[in-house]
Amino acid sequence: MSDKAKSSRRKIRYAVVGTGHIAQVAILPAFTTAKNSELVAIVSSDSQKREELSKKYGLQRAYSYDEYDQALSEIDAVYLTLPNHLHSEYGIRAAKAGVHVLCEKPMALTEEECESMIQAAEQSKIKLMIAYRLHFERGNLEAIDIAKSGKLGNTRFFSSDFAQQVADGNIRLTEPVEKGGGPVYDLGVYCINAARYLFQDEPSEILSSSASSDDSKFKQAGEMVSVVMRFPGERLASFTCSFGAADMSRYTLVGTKGTLTADPAYEYASGIKHRVTIDGQTTNKNFPKRDQFAAEITYFSNCVRKNQEPEPSGLEGLADVRIVRAIYESANSGKSVKLPEFTKRKRPSLGQEIHKQAHGKPETVNVESPSGEAA
């Protein structure tokens, strides 16, 4: 058997870098059903996490962040689930070591950081993918298909609400916006991404406004932001994302003939629900909970094994981050911000669906959910 054939058949060996809430409740368990992928190591600053999670998942290797370079020498790929301001540094270090990079969103803090990650991946000839798990989820992909089909007529506007009550002391609130804190980097990217793939286009202008209650926990990163994005064809997309409101996760796409509402729209802990109304006739469809993380890991490993460029690529991450930056610029200045033209040809489609069975809620080590509840 040729080396190429062997490479295409073997499992891709991963280290998960960062062992916070999302890693423990969703990413580490996902390797059980991602059959082309193998979890071989974790990287964490917490010695108790390293010890207990290694036992739980049968790992021979667990590293501190000081040992990151050693970890890179023993794996094929990293799944980065670090604080946002560390994505670029750790992604570039992995790329330079010849290790493939699956990076949680947001990709990075600035366009320059995103571009540096893309350049490092190209120079080292490794695969770089941003973890937009909904790009492999049936409910989400069917919404894209409906939007593209013309069943709603000409799509005219999009609106979305994404909110949760984040506990005082959570990193999403303790880190300032300059280090990736706040609701837009964490929640807003979902709304931005949804508007872009449902409209199949890139926005040309951003207008936004922020607001915060007098609760001291919002002092660093802010409470909520509302945004209006202008798209070619005189289309508008608006959304509000908040760290200080009841749980909400929905969007509505309105065309000249009908509407599509997804509620919930962005969750991984529950299924997606659609309500579609066309010419006065309404249908409802439920998509059961699936393991969205196992699906994206499986897809990325296939890209590595087959030497294929992933969708969502680093360019997809850059497309959203440039909008996030414009949102905060507009909120700070009180003026709209024009965006330069941006070309993005490859977008998610039904052909990317991967169905992986959902798993139960795992026991966790030294971690709380963003709402402050024991995970």
Image (cartoon, helix red, strand yellow):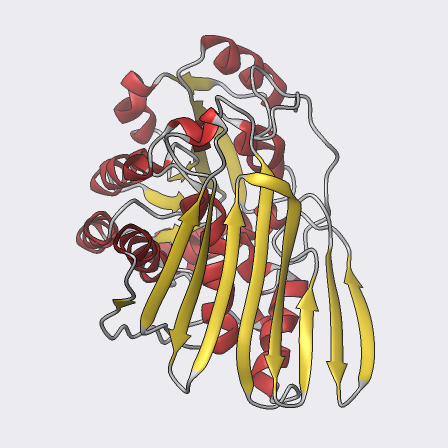
Q: Is residue 275 left or right of residue 217?
A: right
Q: Which residue is drawn at the image coordinates 61% and 68% (left, top)?
A: 141
For the question of whether residue 104 can be seen, the reply is: no
Q: Position of residue 211 (x, y in %)?
A: 44, 45
Q: What is the total number of numbered labels drawn onto the structure image?
A: 0
Residue 154: image x %, image y %? 56, 89
Looking at the rendered image, the quarter that the N terminus falls into is: bottom left
Task: Looking at the picture, tell me which residue is in the foreground, 266 or 4.
Answer: 266
- Residue 57 visible, this angle: yes
- Tell me residue 74's x, y (percent): 35, 29
- Residue 259, x across and y down, in percent: 68, 78
Quarter of the image where one finds residue 2: bottom left
Q: Residue at 51% of width from left, 9% of height from top?
A: 48
Q: What residue is rendered at 61% in x and 54% in y?
A: 266
In this image, 136 relative to 344: left or right? right
Picture quarter with the C terminus: top right
Closer to the camera, 90 or 163? 163
Q: Nearer the viewer, residue 159 or 323?
A: 159
